[in-house]
Image: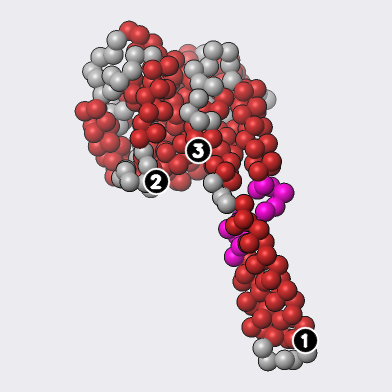
C-alpha cells in the first residue's frame, strides 16, 4: 500500500488533494486485487477514473507551473502526455484469470512509478512551488464568505471544463491578438510594405538574370531582394488573404462561435472571455476579498486590465497573462 505522507505534499491544496485521490485509487485497486478472483471489474472501474484524473489534475498542475514560469513545465507536459497515452492504450489481457491479474499488476506497477506523490517534480521544482504558494497565501483571505466560496467553486469547475478545450481557448486568444494588431496598423503601412516586397522581388529576379549572365553584381541583387521579401513576409506586414481586416474579423467571430458551441448553460463567462487565465484571475480576486461573486470578480479583472499600460511594470508571470487575455477585452471594448 502507498501512503500519502508529508513528503508527498507540495502544499498547494488543490494539487495535494488530487494527489491524495490518486493514492486512494491505487490503494483501493491493490486491496481489491488481493481479495478478488476476477480482476476484470477492477480494471473496468479504475481506468475511467484514471483517465478523468489525468484530464483534470494534469491541467491544474500545468496551469500552476505555467503561472510561475516553472522551467520544468515542458518536461512535465511530456510526462503527462506519456501517462495519458498509457491510460488510453492500456488493454487488460483477459485471455485467462492469471493473465488478467498480471496485466493489472503491470498497470499498478507503472502507476507506482509515475505517481505524482513519489514525486513527479525535482526537489528544486517542489521548493519553487512551495515558495510560490506561501507568497500567495499572504494575499488571500483565510475564510471566504459563503457567497464568495460558492462563486470560487463555480469558477474552478469552469476552469477545469476549459482545460479540456486548449485549442479553442488558444484560438480565441490568437484571433483577438490578430484583430487588435490589425485595428492598430496603419493601412498605408501595409501597402508601403507590399511595394517594398515587390521591389525586392524585382531585384531578386534581376539578380538571378544577371547572375546567369555571369555579371559580378548579380549575386548581391539576388540576396538583397530575397532578404527584403523574407523580412516583410516574416513580419506579416504585407496585406494577404489572412491578415486583412475582413479575414481577422471573421476569424475572431468564428473563434467566439466555436467556443460558444461547447460552453454549457450558465457558464460564468461569455464566449469572448472564456479563457483559463481569465478564470484564474477571477478566482484570485475572490480569494483576495475584492469581490463576492463571479460578476463582481469579472468587473475587477476588467478594471485591473484597464489599469495596466506600458508605464506599469509587472512580473513576467503577470505580463504573460495580460498578453494572453487583454486583447480579448480590448477588441470587445470591455463589454
Indicate whether 74 appears above or below 115: below
Indicate whether 256 appears above or below 153: below
| N-term mark: 1 or 3 | 1
Query: Is 201 included in the stretch rendered in magenta?
Result: no
Residue shown at the point (63%, 62%) measured from the top left: 192
The chief SS type of the magenta part is loop
Q: Secondary structure at mark 2?
A: loop
Q: Secondary structure at mark 1?
A: helix
Position in image of residue 159 (x %, y %): 47, 24
Q: Residues within 10 Å of mark 2 (few under 14, many from 20)?
A: some
Pick the residue in front: 131 or 284: 284
The residue pinned by badge 2 equals 72
Position in image of residue 323 (x %, y %): 45, 42
Pick the residue in front: 331 or 123: 331
Pick the residue in front: 87 or 1: 87
Q: Which mark is residue 327?
A: 3
Residue shown at the point (35%, 35%) measured from the top left: 307
Confirm or deny contact between disc 1 and disc 2 (CB under 8 A).
Answer: no
Residue shown at the point (69%, 41%) measured from the top left: 246
- Choose mark 3 or mark 2, whichever is in front: 3
Using the numbered discs, state the Cα–Cα distance from disc 3 to disc 2 in whole angstroms. Answer: 28 Å
- The stretch of residues the image draws in magenta is 231-244
Position in image of residue 255 (x %, y %): 63, 32
Tell me which corner region of the image, top left, top right, bottom left or bottom right, holds residue 148. top left
Which colouring convention does the figure follow? Answer: secondary structure
- Choose mark 1 or mark 3, whichever is in front: 3
The residue pinned by badge 1 equals 212
Q: Residues within 10 Å of mark 1 (few under 14, many from 20)?
A: few
Tell me which corner region of the image, top left, top right, bottom left or bottom right, holds residue 70. top left
Confirm or deny contact between disc 1 and disc 3 (CB under 8 A).
Answer: no
Amino acid at each position: 500500500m502507498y501512503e500519502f505522507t508529508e513528503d508527498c505534499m507540495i502544499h498547494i491544496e488543490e494539487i495535494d488533494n488530487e494527489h491524495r485521490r490518486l493514492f486512494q485509487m491505487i490503494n483501493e485497486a491493490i486491496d481489491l486485487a488481493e481479495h478478488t478472483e476476477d480482476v476484470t471489474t477492477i480494471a473496468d472501474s479504475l481506468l475511467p477514473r484514471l483517465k478523468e484524473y489525468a484530464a483534470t489534475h494534469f491541467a491544474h498542475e500545468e496551469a500552476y507551473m505555467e503561472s510561475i514560469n516553472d522551467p520544468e513545465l515542458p518536461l512535465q507536459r511530456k510526462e503527462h502526455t506519456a501517462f495519458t497515452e498509457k491510460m488510453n492504450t492500456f488493454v487488460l489481457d483477459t485471455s485467462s484469470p492469471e493473465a488478467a491479474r498480471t496485466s493489472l499488476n503491470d498497470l499498478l506497477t507503472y502507476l507506482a512509478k509515475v505517481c505524482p506523490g513519489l514525486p513527479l517534480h525535482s526537489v528544486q521544482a517542489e521548493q519553487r512551488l512551495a515558495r510560490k504558494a506561501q507568497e500567495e497565501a499572504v494575499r488571500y483571505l483565510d475564510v471566504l464568505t459563503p457567497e464568495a466560496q460558492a462563486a470560487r467553486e463555480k469558477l474552478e469547475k469552469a476552469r477545469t471544463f476549459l482545460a479540456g478545450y486548449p485549442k479553442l481557448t488558444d484560438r480565441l486568444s490568437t484571433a483577438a491578438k490578430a484583430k487588435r494588431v490589425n485595428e492598430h496598423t496603419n493601412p498605408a503601412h501595409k501597402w508601403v510594405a507590399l511595394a517594398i516586397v515587390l521591389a525586392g522581388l524585382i531585384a531578386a529576379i534581376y539578380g538571378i538574370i544577371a547572375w546567369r549572365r555571369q555579371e559580378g553584381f548579380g549575386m548581391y541583387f539576388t540576396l538583397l531582394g530575397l532578404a527584403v521579401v523574407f523580412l516583410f513576409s516574416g513580419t506579416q506586414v504585407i496585406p494577404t488573404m489572412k491578415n486583412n481586416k475582413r479575414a481577422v474579423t471573421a476569424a475572431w467571430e468564428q473563434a467566439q462561435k466555436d467556443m460558444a458551441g461547447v460552453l454549457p448553460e450558465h457558464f460564468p463567462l461569455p464566449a469572448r472571455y472564456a479563457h483559463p487565465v481569465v478564470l484564474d484571475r477571477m478566482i484570485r480576486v475572490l480569494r483576495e476579498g475584492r469581490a463576492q461573486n463571479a460578476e463582481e470578480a469579472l468587473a475587477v479583472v476588467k478594471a485591473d486590465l484597464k489599469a495596466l499600460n506600458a508605464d506599469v511594470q509587472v512580473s513576467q508571470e503577470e505580463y504573460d497573462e495580460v498578453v494572453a487575455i487583454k486583447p480579448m477585452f480590448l477588441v470587445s471594448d470591455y463589454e
